[in-house]
Image (cartoon, grey):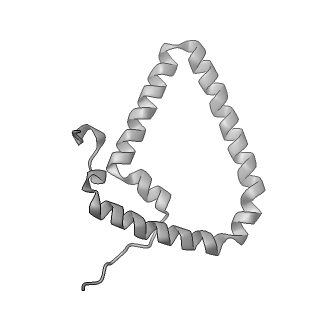
Amino acid sequence: MGSVRVNLNGNVLKRVAKLPLISSALQQASSVYMGVKGRYPLLGFVGGVAELGVRSASTAALKQAAPLLQNLEPEIEAVNRFALVGLEQLEKFFPILQQPTDEVSV
């Protein structure tokens, strides 16, 4: 039985975000969101306020969680490696992940 070479470098979340199917879906969703915000000023205002709130809350949470994340760094790295192995398997069995959404037919 041949050995499987797995690329354990990098962050699994960044790799998932770079998959053509995921990346193009995120771009389309962002484009629709920006279009709706532009078309409906009140919704644009509410969306902008919500975005600021999420950014502020995320920044505050990250500052509070930083010491805990530093302590858990070895465990986080182990989970990341395990997830990278799983991602390699998903990419192997689901080649559709390498296609942008406009090339995927149902």
Residue at point 45%, 33% (across, down): 30
Corner quadrant of residue 66: bottom right
Residue at point 70%, 68% (across, down): 70
Q: Quick check: 61 above or below 85?
A: above
Q: Position of residue 33 (x, y in %)?
A: 48, 27
Quadrant of image for the C terminus? top left
- Give the number of marks: 0
Q: Position of residue 28 (x, y in %)?
A: 38, 34
Q: Nearer the viewer, residue 57 or 88?
A: 88
Q: Position of residue 93 (x, y in %)?
A: 28, 62
Q: Quick check: 90 above or below 101?
A: below
Residue at point 62%, 26% (across, down): 48
Residue closest to the far bottom: 1
Q: Quick check: 12 above or below 71?
A: above
Q: Nearer the viewer, residue 2 or 25?
A: 2
Horizontal side of 64 relative to 37 (left or right) equals right
Corner quadrant of residue 78: bottom right
Horizontal side of 39 relative to 76 (left or right) equals left
Quadrant of image for the N terminus? bottom left
Q: Position of residue 74 (x, y in %)?
A: 63, 75
Residue at point 38%, 40% (across, down): 25
Q: Nearer the viewer, residue 34 or 89?
A: 89
Horizontal side of 87 relative to 79 (left or right) equals left
